[in-house]
Image: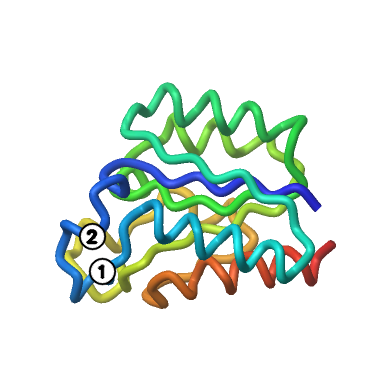
């Protein structure tokens, strides 16, 4: 199973952001764990991170023909980027929305997800382990 993992805006500064919310891992360390978990599960994973919404959307389009599952953490785009939702909607593969922090217990504006009704599952507030749970979910659906 081919899985694309897309991390969005500001996730490149993990390790510098509030560790009580996001943990202390850098994006490179997080991706290292994701690749390790994928190997354990027998999945092929491609991790990407961008602060450019257009580039992020191109990567979603790439997943149309090159992925069997998608794990996505759009960061703040989750709450307002209808263009990302529009790009995801035609995907005929399972999409898992992941957030390191528990967005449902944070500021009111963070509780809105424009993706919530089109994803197969939402995993929030489990830190890096949320990505492992997402990969396990996809493995079970294989």
Q: Quadrant of residue 121?
A: bottom right
* Residue 100 quadrant: bottom left
Q: Residue at x 65, y 28 (%)?
A: 62
Identify the residue at image location x=32%, y=65%.
25
Q: Secondary structure at mark 2?
A: loop
Locate the C terminus by quadrant.
Answer: bottom right
Q: Which residue is denoted by mark 2 in the rendering? A: 15
Q: What's the coloring here?
A: rainbow
Instruction: State which tag comes first along the sequence, 2 or 1.
Output: 2
Report the residue marked by disc 1: 24
Looking at the image, do the residues carrying marks 2 and 1 touch, with CB atoms under 8 Å apart?
yes
Place of residue 60 in the rendered image (x, y in percent of width and height, measured from the top left): 58, 33
Residue found at the very far right of the displayed protein = 142
Question: Where 38 falls versus 81 (above or below)?
Answer: below
Rendered location of residue 140, percent (x, y)? 79, 71
Which residue is located at x 25 percent, y 76 percent? 105
Q: Nearer the viewer, residue 97 or 55?
A: 55
As measured in the structure, the alpha-carbon distance from the residue carrying label 2 to the one carrying label 1 is 5 Å
Instruction: Locate residue 61, reporting x and y percent.
Output: 62, 27
The image position of residue 2, as x and y in percent, is 75, 47
Q: Secondary structure at mark 1?
A: loop
- Determine whether, in the image, residue 36 is placed left or right of residue 12: right
Classify mark 1: residues with Cα within 10 Å, few (<14), some (14-19) or many (20+): some
Residue at 31% of width from left, 70% of height from top? 101
């Amino acid at each position: 199973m081919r899985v694309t993992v897309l991390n969005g805006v500001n996730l490149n500064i993990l390790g510098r952001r509030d560790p009580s919310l996001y943990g202390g891992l850098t994006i490179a360390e997080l991706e290292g764990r994701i690749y390790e978990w994928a190997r354990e599960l027998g999945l092929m994973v491609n991790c990407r991170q961008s602060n450019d919404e257009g580039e992020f959307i191109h990567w979603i389009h790439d997943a149309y023909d090159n992925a069997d599952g998608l794990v996505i953490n759009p960061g703040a785009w989750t709450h307002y980027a209808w263009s990302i939702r529009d790009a995801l909607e035609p995907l005929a593969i399972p999409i898992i929305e992941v957030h390191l922090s528990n967005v449902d217990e944070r500021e009111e504006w963070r509780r809105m997800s424009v993706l919530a009704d089109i994803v197969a599952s939402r995993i929030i507030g489990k830190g890096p382990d949320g990505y492992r749970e997402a990969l396990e979910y996809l493995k079970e659906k294989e």
